Image: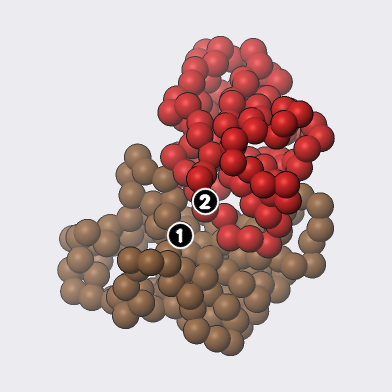
Chain colours: A red, B brown
Amino acid sequence: DAKTTQPTSMDCAEGRAANLPCNHSTISGNEYVYWYRQIHSQGPQYIIHGLKNNETNEMASLIITEDRKSSTLILPHATLRDTAVYYCIKRETSYDKVIFGPGTSLSVIP
Amino acid sequence: GAVVSQHPSRVICKSGTSVKIECRSLDFQATTMFWYRQFPKQSLMLMATSNEGSKATYEQGVEKDKFLINHASLTLSTLTVTSAHPEDSSFYICSARDLSRTGSDTQYFGPGTRLTVL
């Protein structure tokens, strides 16, 4: 099945909101959108996930369009430590294996 | 949150030797663990799914005789790179699935092992 599509790279000024888009136009009704990030030379870290409603936790917010064909991960006040590769992934359940695409390399600029 | 450790964090070996990498779930039992490989400037590639007490399931294109996986207990999976060659040099990452957790995610990743084959 078709995977998600993300921009290759993005820059964000420190202290500003980072908005990372993801296109998942072929998402099925029972698939969730998951976001992970990987800081250089570390293991991936779970950020947030959602089905159709917007979600927020201590790390980020996830905005999913009404047709569920795309979503945006928002880091409200980006810091230098948020520089990482961000992966947007479709999964039917949290028990499914995680298949990573190329992701978006986010650089937070001082 | 759940913690997954890997040992060693980095290893350098000579070509032709075998290297074992351990993945441990420290505060939960994991019937399923996953092994990934990541080359520089590339994404993580899933190599295999490791199931406790049974044979691992390998992804297409991954040589099972080259990458031996053993999941003998609910907290430990090992990946052995046999007869390693320089092209096996990579960042190896494991993850473990915690079925007892609900809500956020059930899969937790280790910090990775950097393998360099000379």
Residue ID at (64%, 13%)? A16
Does dot 2 land on a helix, a strand or a loop? Answer: loop
**Chain at tag 2:** A
* Residue A6 coordinates in the image, percent (x, y): 51, 31
Please tell me which residue is depicted at 58% across the width and 60% down the height of the picture.
Answer: A97
Amino acid on which the number 2 mark rests in the picture: Asp
Instruction: Name the one closer to the observer, A54 or B27.
Output: A54
Residue at label 1?
B46
| Residue drawn at the location 43% of the way across and 72% of the way down | B58
Which residue matches tag 2?
A1
Horizontally, residue B69 falls left or right of residue B65, namely right
Q: Position of residue A105 (x, y in %)?
A: 47, 30
Residue A55 sits in quarter: top right
Q: Nearer the viewer, residue B64 or B69?
A: B64
Depth order, front residue of B76/A105: A105
What is the distance, in whole Å, between disc 1 and disc 2 at their CAs? 16 Å
Report the disc number at residue A88: none
**Callout 1 amino acid:** Leu
B55 displayed left or right of B64: right
